[in-house]
Image (cartoon, rainbow, N blue to C red):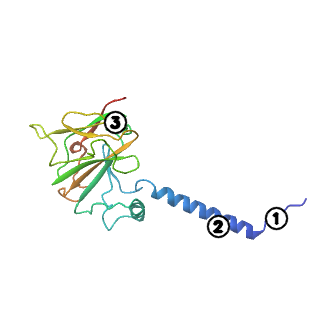
């Protein structure tokens, strides 16, 4: 019985190429998405409190470098994103939503929409955000912001023409340390009202 032997050099080259492929593949996977560690989730809203701090882990730093994002520093505020409504369904431009009626205590907050690629969407009106200073409130200091492709009364942000979108809530100068003393009941609820044309 004649067993053909594979040269050792060929096995070494194969092992190195496999290791290189797995290493590059896992690095690509790790930096294309959200940071894998240190998230804070409050309903549909998710944040990474250490994102703008010196304690940010290497994955966070690599993701920020790849995206070109400049996060809020720990003392400046905290940024939250939502990719789903409060029932866990993905945010979709074909649907109509409301966001409200409360927001966490902060000196200022902003609500901005991004398309599925993380860019500001192109809409007919060009409005993509609201701030706490300009939102219309009721007599109990509550607000509702409508998210829809079609005109809505009151506070309204026009959704992108199609596809998924992301809502970003930034809190500027919140009391206490970033991420401390935050409760889900103090965050806006994202409610889907309906979908279709």
- Callout 3 environment at 10 Å: few (<14), some (14 to 19), or many (20+)? few
| Residue at far right of view | 1
Q: Which mark is residue 87?
A: 3
Identify the secondary structure beneath mark 2: helix
| Mark nearer the viewer, 3 or 1 | 3
Where's residue 32, x and y in %? 46, 55
* Residue at x 31% of width, y 38% of height: 86
Q: Nearer the viewer, residue 162 or 183?
A: 162
Tags 3 and 2 touching, CB below 8 Å: no
Residue 143 is labelled as none
> Rounded to the nearest whole Å, what is the CA distance between mark 3 and mark 1?
59 Å
Q: Nearer the viewer, residue 170 or 59?
A: 170
> In the orientation shown, which residue stands out farthest toward the front?
124
| Relative height, residue 152 to residue 6 (above, below) | above
Give the residue number, with chain letter if any, for mark 1.
5
Q: Which mark is residue 16?
A: 2
- Residue 143 coordinates in the image, percent (x, y): 17, 39
Instruction: Give the side of residue 25 with respect to residue 54, left or right.
Output: right
Dot 1 alpha-carbon crowd within 10 angstroms: few under 14, some 14 to 19, many 20 or more:
few
Residue 178 in view (yes/no): no
* Mark sitting earlier along the chain (1/2): 1
Q: Are marks 1 and 2 in contact (CB under 8 Å)?
A: no
| Residue 133 image position (x, y, % from top left) | 14, 49
Secondary structure, mark 1, is loop
Image quarter hosting the C terminus: top left
């Amino acid at each position: 019985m004649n067993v053909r032997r594979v040269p050792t050099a060929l096995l070494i080259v194969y092992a190195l190429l496999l290791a290189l492929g797995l290493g590059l593949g896992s690095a690509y996977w790790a930096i294309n998405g959200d940071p894998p560690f240190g998230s804070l989730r409050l309903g549909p809203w998710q944040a990474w409190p250490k994102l703008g701090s010196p304690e940010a882990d290497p994955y966070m730093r690599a993701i920020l470098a790849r995206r070109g994002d400049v996060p809020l520093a720990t003392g400046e505020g905290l940024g939250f994103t939502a990719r789903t409504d409060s029932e866990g369904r993905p945010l979709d431009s074909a649907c109509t939503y409301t966001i409200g009626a409360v927001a966490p205590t902060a000196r200022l907050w902003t609500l901005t929409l991004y398309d599925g690629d993380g860019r500001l969407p192109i809409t007919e009106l060009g409005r993509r955000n609201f701030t706490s200073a300009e939102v219309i409130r009721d007599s109990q200091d509550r607000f509702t912001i409508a998210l829809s492709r079609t005109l809505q009364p009151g506070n309204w942000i026009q959704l992108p023409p199609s596809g998924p979108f992301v809502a970003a809530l930034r809190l500027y100068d919140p009391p206490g340390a970033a991420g401390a003393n935050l409760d889900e009941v103090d965050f806006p609820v994202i409610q889907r009202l309906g979908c279709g044309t």
